[in-house]
Image (cartoon, coloured by chain):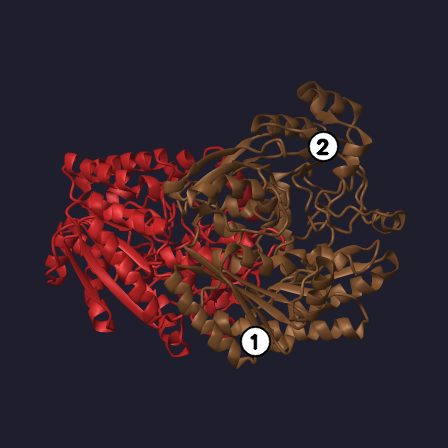
Chain colours: A brown, B red
C-alpha cells in the first residue's frame, strides 16, 4: 500500500520546484498515441493523478496522459511518436520511488509498464531468468518458489524489476548478494528514437565493449526505457537464522557491524534500528522489542555453516556488551523478528498525523560509519527533530526517516543538507540506493563536480531531444 | 617475462590490419611534449618498439614517441597537447594485453604510466586502498601482505591496475570475489580534453548518477586515461585448500564444475585444464600430473568451513567418477599444485618453436558450458589444430590457447570464428576478460548489433577528436 496523503499545503510547498519550460503533449501527439493504443491511452484525471504521485514527499503536475503499453514494440512506437514531437516520456512502474522520479515536472506522457509483467523464461541450470520490466518483486519471488532459486535484491517496496534497474536498487540482502549491478546480466531497452538494443548476455561476465547494462542501471529512466531484464539467481540456502541484538549504545551496535564485516563473516542481512525506530515499531505493530539500538543479523548457509557463524557472532557481540539477543531459525519466528524492520517506514509516518516522510540515504565508508551515525543522531537531537534511523549498515548505508508537516520542511531540509555534507566529507555518497530524482540534484553536483559534465554529455548523446524523464538527475 | 618473438613473417601478416588514416605526431607536438617532459619523452627506436608490442600475436607500427608521465597533472597536460593537435594517445601499462591494445595503428604517442606506481593509501578499516594506475598487481600484493587483506583480481599476468581497469580484468578468483567491476570503488581519470574527473566514492555502493566508474572499466583506454584507482580489499582467509581432480572425460570435469556452482559451494577458484594442457605443462615444468581432464578447486574460509566444503566436494566429484584427487593445504603444496595452471600459456607456446599464441576468450552460460567445451574440443581435433583448453569454468569462461606459425593463421582464425559463433548461439560473449582490442572488433558487432551505435555515440561524446586509443574496440 502506498502512502498517498497529499494536502494542499504539501502541494504548494513542492509543486513549483521545477524551472523547466513546460512541454506538454499536443493534441496531435495524443491523437497519434491513441491511434496506436486505443483506450490504453488514458487522459482521465484520476489515472493521471495516480501516475503523478509516488511514495516521496514530492508533488508535481500530473502527466498529460498515461500510455499503458504491452510490448517492447509498443514502447518503441510510443517513443518514436514522442521523440518526433519532443514530448517528455516518464517511465512508470510500481510508483514506489522515494525521490519523485515519476513526477511530470514539465508535462508529457507517463509510460506505464505494469502491463508488461510476464516472466519470460526461468533457466535453473544457468541460475538465471528473464522477465519483462513490469514484473514485480513479490510476483517473481512466487514464480521462483518451486525452483530452489531466488532473486536476492530486496528494496523493501514491491517495486517492478524495471524500476529497480532505474534506481540501482539494493536493500537488506545487498551485504551478501550485491545490488542490481551485481545481479543483472542483460537488458532489453528502447532508446528515445525507438531503436531497441540488447545489452550484456546470459554469461556471468564479459569484457565486450562499453558496459551499457551498468550504464542504464541507475540512470533513473533518463537514457532508455528498460523493457526486459535478465537476472542472476541464487540458490535458496539450506538454512537461515536471524538474531536481533540490543546494545547499550548505537556506537556499540555499529562497531559490532563493522567488526563483523572486517572479519569477513558472510552475513546475509545486517540491519540497524535505533531506539526510536524500535519504539515506533513497537507501538505501530504491537511488538515488544527491547527499546535500545539493535542489529538484525541474518545468516544463510548449510546448518553446519550457520552453526559455525552463530558461534563467531555470539563471541563478537559479547565483546560489544550486547544486552539481549533473540535467535530464530523457523520461518515463522524469523518473520516475527523481521516485523519491526519491515514496518519501520509506516511506523515512522504514523508518529506525526498527516505527515509526509523524507528519507535520507547516505552511504559512507565502513571505517567512518560509526562516527557519521553518532554525529547524525546528535544532530537530530540538537535540532529537536523527530527522526528514526535504520540502515543496511553492512554496506555503510543508512536512512534517517523524517516524518514532517509543511511547516517543518526547511528544518528537515537543513538537517538533510548537513547529513550529506557529513557523508561526503567522510568519503561517501549522497544516495546509496534511492537515486537522485528530484530531491538530490544539488547534491549530485556537490558529489561529482566535473564528472557531471560527462554525465550530461552522455545524456545528450543518447537523448538529444531530452524526452526521457526530464528534470530528474540533472 | 613477456613473450616477444616477432618474425618478419608475423609482421607481414598483421601489420596491415588497420584501415585508419595515419595521424602521426607532428614535430610541433613532439616539441611541446618535450618542453613538458624533457627526456621523459623518448623517440628512441628500442623504446618505441617495446611500446608497440604486447603479449598478443598482433603487430603494428610502433608509436611515434613514448611519454613517461609521473602525475595526473602531467597526464592532463599531455592530453591537452595531443587533443589540440588530434594526435592519438595510447595508454601503456605492463604491456600484457592479449588483444593488441597498445598498438599504434595510426601513429601517435604511447603514454607510459608505469612511473605512476605509488600506493597512495591503505585503509584497513574500510577494507580499501588507493593506488596510482601504474601500480602492478604483485607490487600491491606485497604491500598488502602485512595487513591481513588482499586484492583478489588475478588475471595471471603481472598487469598494472590501470590496465586491469581498461580490460575489466578477471581471472582465477573471480568465481568467488568478482571481477574489476565488483572490486573497484572509484577512479581518477583524465578526459581527452585534459579535464580530471573523479568517479564513485569510498562507499561500497551508490545510486548517484550514471555509473562512470563501470563505464570506464572495460573501455580499453578509449574514453579516458585512468590515473588512480580505489580498490575494495578482502580479508585473507584463515585457511586455503586446493584439490586437483582428474576425470575420465572433459564432460565429467565440466559437469562437476556446473554442479558445484549450482549447489552454491563458495569455491575460491575453479579452473579447468584439458589433457593436452596437462601434458604440455608436465613437459614444460617437469611435473608429473595425471594426463587427463582436470579441475583445480580452491576453498577459502575458516578451517571448519573448508573442512565442511571439502566433504561436499569429495561427495560430488565421486558422483562424476573422479579418477584421482590430490589435496593440499600448506602454502608450498598449494603452489606446487598450481604450477601447471600458471605455466599453461608458456607451456603451450613452447609446443611449437617460433610460434605466437592466439588465445580465445569466450564466456557462456553455465547451462551450456559442457556442450560448448565438448563441441570445441571436437572441432579442435577435426581441424587438426594444436590447442590447449584452460578455463575459469566456474564463471563459464574458457580459453583455447593456440600456438601457431604464420602459415596456420587462416585455419586458427576460422576455428576462432566458429568458437565465437558457438558461444554467441549459446547466449554467451566473445570475450570474458581479455577485451576486444584489435582482434575481436568484428565479433563485437556480431554480439551487440545496434547497441554498438550507442557505444559509438558515447565515444564521440567523450572523445570527439578520437585521440584515445583509436582503432581499438570499433
Seen in the picture, residue A86 relative to A236 is either above or below; the reply is above
Q: Position of residue A203 (x, y in %)?
A: 39, 43
Question: Are discs 2 and 1 located on one and the same chain?
Answer: yes
Q: Image point 71% across, 47% down: which residue?
A: A472
Report the chain holding disc 1.
A
Q: Foreground: A172 or A468? A: A172
Residue A54 image point, x, y percent = 73, 45
Q: Which residue is mark 2?
A: A86
Instruction: Name the residue at 67% across, 75% down.
Output: A374
Position of residue B260 in the picture relative to residue B29 (left or right): left
List x then y, in percent, for residue B420: 32, 37
Outermost residue to the top: A35
For the question of whether residue B94 can be seen, the reply is yes
- Which residue is labeled 1 in the image? A255
Q: Chain of mark 2?
A: A
Q: Is residue A286 left or right of residue B116?
A: right
Q: Under tag 2, what secondary structure?
A: loop
Q: Is residue A449 visible?
A: no
Q: Is residue A208 above or below residue B425?
A: below
Above or below, A63 against A27 in this view is: below
Tag 1 secondary structure: helix
Name the quarter where the C terminus of chain B is drawn.
top left
- In the image, A379 versus B304, the foreground residue is B304
Amino acid at each position: 500500500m502506498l502512502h498517498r496523503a497529499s494536502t494542499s499545503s504539501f502541494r504548494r510547498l513542492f509543486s513549483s520546484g521545477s524551472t523547466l519550460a513546460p512541454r506538454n503533449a499536443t493534441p496531435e501527439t495524443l491523437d497519434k498515441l491513441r491511434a496506436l493504443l486505443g483506450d490504453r491511452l488514458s487522459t482521465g484525471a484520476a489515472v493521471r493523478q495516480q501516475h503523478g504521485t509516488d511514495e516521496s514527499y514530492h508533488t508535481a503536475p500530473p502527466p498529460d496522459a498515461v500510455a499503458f503499453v504491452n510490448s517492447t514494440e509498443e514502447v518503441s512506437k510510443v517513443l518514436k511518436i514522442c521523440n518526433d514531437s519532443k514530448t517528455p516520456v516518464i517511465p512508470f512502474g510500481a510508483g514506489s520511488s522515494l525521490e519523485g522520479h515519476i513526477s511530470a515536472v514539465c508535462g508529457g506522457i507517463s509510460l506505464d509498464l505494469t502491463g508488461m509483467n510476464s516472466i519470460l523464461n526461468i533457466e535453473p541450470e544457468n541460475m538465471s531468468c528473464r522477465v519483462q520490466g513490469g514484473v514485480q518483486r513479490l510476483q517473481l519471488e512466487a514464480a521462483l518458489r518451486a525452483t530452489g532459486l531466488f532473486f536476492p535484491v530486496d528494496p523493501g517496496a514491491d517495486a517492478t524489476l524495471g524500476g529497480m534497474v532505474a534506481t540501482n536498487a539494493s536493500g537488506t540482502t545487498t551485504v551478501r548478494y550485491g545490488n542490481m549491478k551485481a545481479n543483472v546480466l542483460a537488458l532489453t531497452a528502447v532508446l528515445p528514437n525507438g531503436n531497441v538494443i540488447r545489452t550484456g548476455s546470459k554469461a556471468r561476465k564479459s569484457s565486450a565493449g562499453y558496459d551499457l547494462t551498468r550504464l542504464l542501471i541507475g540512470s533513473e529512466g533518463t537514457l532508455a526505457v528498460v523493457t526486459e531484464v535478465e537476472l542472476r539467481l541464487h540458490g535458496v540456502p539450506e538454512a537461515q537464522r536471524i538474531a536481533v541484538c540490543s546494545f547499550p549504545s548505537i556506537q556499540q551496535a555499529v562497531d559490532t557491524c563493522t567488526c563483523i564485516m572486517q572479519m569477513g563473516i558472510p552475513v546475509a542481512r545486517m540491519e540497524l534500528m535505533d531506539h526510536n525506530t524500535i519504539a515506533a515499531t513497537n507501538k505501530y505493530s504491537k511488538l515488544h522489542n527491547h527499546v535500545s539500538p539493535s542489529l538484525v543479523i541474518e545468516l544463510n548457509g548449510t546448518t553446519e555453516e550457520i552453526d559455525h557463524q552463530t558461534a563467531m557472532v555470539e563471541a563478537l557481540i559479547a565483546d560489544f556488551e550486547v544486552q539481549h539477543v533473540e535467535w530464530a531459525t523457523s520461518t515463522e519466528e524469523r518473520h516475527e523478528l523481521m516485523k519491526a524492520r519491515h514496518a519501520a517506514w509506516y511506523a515512522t509516518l504514523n508518529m506525526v498525523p498527516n505527515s509526509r516522510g523524507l528519507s535520507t540515504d547516505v552511504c559512507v565508508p565502513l571505517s567512518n560509519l560509526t562516527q557519521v551515525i553518532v554525529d547524525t543522531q546528535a544532530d537530530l537531537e540538537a535540532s529537536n527533530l523527530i527522526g528514526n534511523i535504520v540502515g543496511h549498515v553492512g554496506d555503510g548505508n543508512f536512512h534517517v526517516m523524517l516524518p514532517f508537516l509543511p511547516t517543518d520542511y526547511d528544518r528537515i531540509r537543513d538537517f538533510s543538507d548537513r547529513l550529506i555534507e557529513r557523508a561526503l566529507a567522510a568519503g561517501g555518497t549522497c544516495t546509496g540506493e534511492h537515486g537522485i530524482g528530484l530531491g538530490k540534484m544539488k547534491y549530485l553536483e556537490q558529489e561529482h563536480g566535473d564528472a557531471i559534465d560527462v554525465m550530461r554529455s552522455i545524456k545528450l548523446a543518447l537523448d538529444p531531444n531530452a524526452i526521457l524523464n526530464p528534470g530528474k538527475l540533472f
